[in-house]
Image (cartoon, coloured by chain):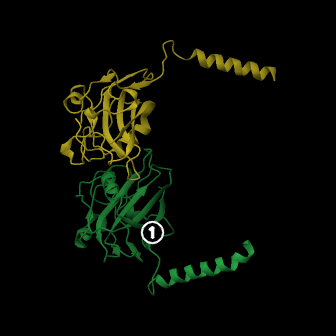
Amino acid sequence: MISTNIPRVLALLMLIGGAALAARPAGAVDFRVYSHDIKDGQFQQDQILSKAYGLGCEGSNLSPHINWEGMPEGTESFVLTMFDPDANNGKGWTHWVVVNIPYAVNSLPRGAGGSGAVAAVGALQTRNDFGQANYGGPCPPPGQTHHYVVTLTALNVRTLPVDKDATPAMVAAAIDGHKIAAVSFTATYQR
Amino acid sequence: MRLAVLALMLIGFVALRTLPASAQAFRLTSQDTANGQIRPEQVMSKAYGYGCSGGNLSPDLSWSGAPQGTQSFVLTIFDMDAPNGLGWFHWVVVDIPSTVNSLPTGASGGGIASIGALETRTDFGVPGYGGPCPPSGTAHRYRFVLTALRIPKLPIDGNATPAMVGIYVEANKLDQASFTAIYGR
């Protein structure tokens, strides 16, 4: 029984596979997010937290250039977050949150997290775990290597019902139910 | 072999002897969440606009058995099941003096200030108690945690985020007492 069914199953699988491939628009690329500013998976000195924060780091606190492509069908907006799962508080640390990025935008320039570049494209920065609505770069304790996960989430809504004072928890709750797909990359930093 | 057993017995005896005579477990309890259930008085009020209509009164809490060397306490209430992948801090109180061993119902606000403690931002973005209000049809687990610290005050103000408080708590904790209560609607 089994042996006689194998050709049929194979034919069916091939048909399904063929249909799935045919459904993709020509030239479609995989949804992905990346940065040319982050070399070899390492944050660079100018992306590190600045001295003014008083945590012992002396970077320029410039957010890295972020690019993405291959947005899924139905995308109305994006949310970008940068999160340190290794923070010494048992819960992680959100370094950057940008919401309401219009679907037509596919990059944020270097330093966008501290300039008017985010507002210029019609997006909004909300509070990070420093309590501020901007980019706060990596600054792990001396001797520790932390991972920083940059995630771009495609949403089926144009805007989230939040303002710049929204906490990372509030933004994450607002995303719930509107996520189409999310992609991410991870980079590390040690001082 | 015999020597090893003897040595282990000696070590065990010494370890027992070093415990203070009155040692008891560090415990945190609440009459307002008896039976592990959160009451309507503690649930979020209508004013927040999340669809709940409780009293938003912070629960009473009592504790005992704080470790030797405790200089202050930090209290947090955390929703482990918030549908955001991060959880949700509903209350954060720092700098609770080591001489305090209870908080009455509704202490958030004036009551906390009057004992010299400080409320810092919750995940609602403002300092002060924000009661449970899980989405309709769900029940969430709320973790109440009291941490004994070896320092009397944290170097922060009321705008500190839960993440920031967490860094100082982890760096200065002596011991923690906790319990979990449930609320569903």
Residue that carries the numbered disc 1 in the rendered image: A38
User: Foreground residue, B84 or B148?
Assistant: B84
- Quadrant showing the N terminus of chain A: bottom right
Q: Which chain is yellow?
A: B
- In x, y percent, where is residue B74? 35, 33
> Hey, which quadrant is residue A83 in on the image?
bottom left
Task: Indicate the amino acid at tag 1.
Answer: Ile
Identify the residue at the far right of this view.
Answer: B1
- Mark 1 residue element: loop
Considering depth in this image, is B22 or A144 the residue closer to the camera?
B22
Above or below A150: residue B110 = above
Image quarter for residue A96? bottom left
Image x and y of residue A160, in percent: 27, 62
Q: Is residue A114 left or right of residue A44?
A: left
Q: Residue at x 70, y 18 (%)?
A: B9
- Image: B13 above or below A39: above
Q: Residues within 10 Å of mark 1 (few under 14, many from 20)?
A: some
Residue B106, given in percent of the width and then of the height, sits at 23, 29
The answer to whether residue B164 is left or right of residue B4 is left
Residue B53 can be seen, yes or no: yes
Q: Is residue B73 above or below residue B85?
A: above
Q: Which chain is green?
A: A
Chain assignment, label 1: A
| Residue A113 percent across, percent down from the top left | 30, 64
Q: Residue furthest bottom?
A: A26
A23 or A67, nearer to the observer: A23
In this figure, what is the number of numbered marks? 1
Residue B70 makes an appearance in the image: no
Return the residue found at the far front.
Answer: A1
Residue situated in front as seen by the camera: A186 or B83:
B83
